[in-house]
Image (cartoon, helix red, strand yellow):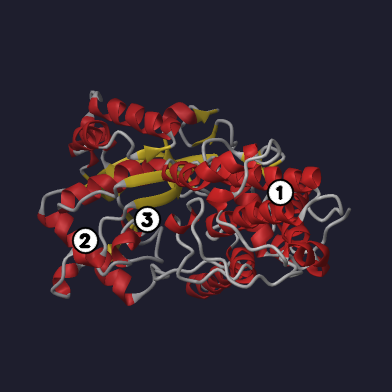
Amino acid sequence: MDPQKFVDELSVHFRNLTKKANISNTHFTRTTSRQHIHAVQHLWKELEAKGYIYKGRHEGWYSVSDETFIPEKQIEGIRPTRKDGVVEHTDERVFWYSEENYMFRLSAFPGHIYEYYTARRTDAIHPRTQALDVHLMLQGLMHSLRPSFNDLSISRPRSRLSWGIPVPGDPEQTIYVWIDALAAYLTSVGYPWSSTGGDGIAAGWPPNLQVIGKDIIRFHALYFPAMLQALGLPLPVQLLSHAHWTVERAKMSKSVGNVADPIKAIDDFGIDLVRYYLARVGGRFQDDVDWSQDQLQKHSKEIISLLGNLFMRATSDKLMRKVSTVKARELSLVSESQGSKALLQSLKTLAPKFDGHLRKFELATAVEAVVAALSEANALMTQAAPWARETSPSVAADIQALVFETLRQSGILLQPIMPDTATLLLDSLGLPKDQRTIADAAFGRSGLGEVRPGVRLFDMGSLNLRA
């Protein structure tokens, strides 16, 4: 298949998946666009004019499947003729290549990048394990006995790589992915800004947070920062380098056939339940997590029970009739009984705790805080039985008020994770749309309007769940 046609089809698939996953974006940058091609060639000329690009001979062990050179220490079974070998752990076959390429003077920058990461931004890379790996990588480069040996090959002969952007002034060479793909971050905010009369800061550069996979940390924490420093541009403020979803503890691979299907999962469970599972189980970022249909089902049932059933219990006809004769009281006046003490304490700290966890990229822990509050609210409902005949209307009203506050806070906090469900919940509580920020999630903020009883937050009929 023609490469352009192939990537055109892939692009459509990715765009459709983002829509299906309820993910928005301001730009969808493609490396085949005219704007990107212009940006890459401009960037190349800038680096060349500053003396950071030179032509040299590059040789090493090349992995065709990974399209990258592999360090010799990672190669096993090297033949005496140095023709081929295999990569340890992956068994990927590599071949010895020796060819003339353009090189980027990566060796000029490890010290500057190391200084940035250590002296200026101690939290520049998260999680800490990835930061330590980058520091070790940089220290190795700084203490190298042959610094130029670490310079980066940034082109390939046109005869071997014909589909790509030609090197300016040398059509026999193709700009390689290290320059081409990484430049897409700059393309998305209008680089080169000199052509538009603007500047990077006004366009949105640098990003506050750049999210990448742990397998490409070298490219984003070393190669790209070196290019940015060579261009005189600021580095991204922080890098979040997440771990991988695996299947049976193995990296997903089409050739092996152990690939999870996100589209099927969304079709079976609905996007909000899939997003909840991803955040609840995968939101720690440091360690790989196994994708499991059973776990997806388990956690779907969890949030349906904790959130959906809680709303139904709190707005049942019996309870709504009982509290209709009682004037609603401010939460600060609700009596702190033995049963409600734990929930009250949770609600008073839930929003700042959630916000604090998010700021430290502890997404799963933030979700756990909401789950804990919802669990306490459900336990209070079961223990106090506000609908029971022996429970006085005033006590029932106090309990309902606490549960509504739990639902209000939870709905606000879960908006980034379960946007459709959270919106339906907040609408059902009558909460105005301008009172749904993280600040509004603070305990005791007023704003509930007319509650719509009996709203089903989850469409059970569309779920492929088994009791």
- At x 63%, y 57%, the residue is 407
* Spatial CA span between label 2 and label 3: 13 Å
Contact? badges 2 and 1 (CB < 8 Å): no
Amino acid on which the number 2 mark rests in the picture: Leu
Amino acid on which the number 1 mark rests in the picture: Asn
- At x 82%, y 61%, the residue is 464
x then y, percent, for residue 97: 40, 43
The residue where tag 2 is placed is: 43
Residue 254 visible within the image: no
Is 35 positioned to the left or the right of 80 in the image?
A: left
Residue 384 visible within the image: yes
x then y, percent, for residue 335: 62, 44
Name of the residue lying farthest toward the right: 467
Q: Nearer the viewer, residue 86 or 132?
A: 132
x then y, percent, for residue 135: 33, 29
- At x 58%, y 59%, the residue is 408
- At x 34%, y 45%, the residue is 238
Q: Which mark is residue 177?
A: 3
Amino acid on which the number 3 mark rests in the picture: Val
Q: Report crowding for label 3: few under 14, some 14 to 19, many 20 or more residues within 10 A (C-alpha).
A: some
The residue where tag 1 is placed is: 258
Q: Earlier in the sequence, mark 2 or mark 3?
A: 2
* Spatial CA span between label 3 and label 1: 27 Å
Say which element carries label 3: helix
